[in-house]
Amino acid sequence: MITTLCLDFGNTRLKCAIFIDGNFKEVIVLLDATTSTIKTIIEQYHPDKTILSSVINHDVAIEQFLSDNTSFHKLNHQSKLPFTTPVGKPETIGADRLAICAGAVHLFPNQHNLSIGLGTCITYNFINNQHQFLGGSISPGMNMRFRAMHEQTALLPMIKAEHLFPLVGYDTKTNLLSGVILGMAKEIDGIIEAYQEKYEKLKVTVTGGDWEFFIPYIKNKITADENLLYKGLYAISEFNNP
């Protein structure tokens, strides 16, 4: 059996996923991005292969440790990908976006894909049926919007997201919840519909740490896959680390 460890160092969360012979097994939340934490994971799961996607300034010693103890690949703009990136500056594409796109192409090949990542930011990632990542758009994520309203006003509080709230908010908290979550859901629907007008037979996939707050309110047909990024990392690992 071949065990692959897919590490994702995001702005908000640090996680890794375990694949055995290509089959997704579980996601593990990491306490921090230190070599000692990674060493503990390696000693527990004994992966044959590892891949790292990072959008933070992590300790580079982690990469050396992974290289010394596994067959390691760091995702970057020079990685072999299951799609091409005919954009102006491919080196500026975030590793998380590359992984999401790889997951979409791996699961839904030869069709137009719009993969939406709901995390620190919302990323809209379009890959056409020729497996070309053409770009997309980025807008503020849920918690960024909550924080911006708190930090840039005198009286609005900082709140946490909740699943249940009314359309018509009856106090400050429910007004903020309705405005941010329903507002984002309408934004997402609007972007999906704009792509649908231009591209036929569009496959829409939603993923990211905040996806569950929006699924009840998105009206368009979508596929929700909270592990899309990890599936993409595994696919990229196989391209670069066979």
Image (cartoon, rainbow, N blue to C red):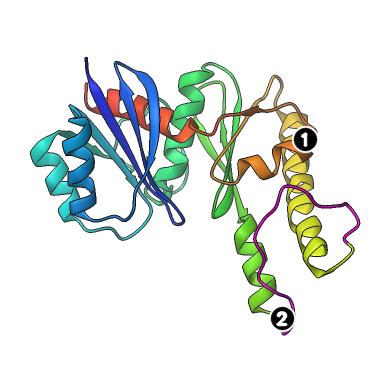
- What is the C-alpha distance between the residues marked 1 and 2? 33 Å
Looking at numbered disc 2 in the image, what kind of residue is underneath it? Thr
Give the residue pinned by disc 1.
193
Query: In this orientation, which residue lies closer to the viewer: 53 or 110?
Result: 53
Q: Is residue 131 left or right of residue 50?
A: right
State the residue at coordinates (33%, 53%): 31
Q: Is residue 143 left or right of residue 74?
A: right
Residue in the foreground of this view, choosing between 232 and 168 = 168
Q: Nearer the viewer, residue 44 or 23?
A: 44
Mark on residue 123? none
Closer to the observer: label 1 or label 2? 2
Q: Nearer the viewer, residue 106 or 89?
A: 106
14 in relation to 66, above or below: below
Is residue 3 shown above or below 93?
above
- Compared to residue 168, the image places residue 238 above or below, namely above
Tell me where residue 67 sits by quadrant.
top left
Residue located 67% across and 56% down the image: 161
Percent of width and height locating residue 235: 36, 25
Q: Which contiguous range is marked in magenta?
A: 154-169
Query: Would residue 124 appear left or right of 35 to someone viewing this image?
Result: right
Q: Residue at x 45, y 21 (%)?
A: 106
What is the quadrant of residue 17 in the picture?
Answer: top left
Q: Residue furthest left?
A: 68
Looking at the rendered structure, which numbered label has been put on residue 153? Answer: 2
Is 212 displayed left or right of 3 in the figure? right
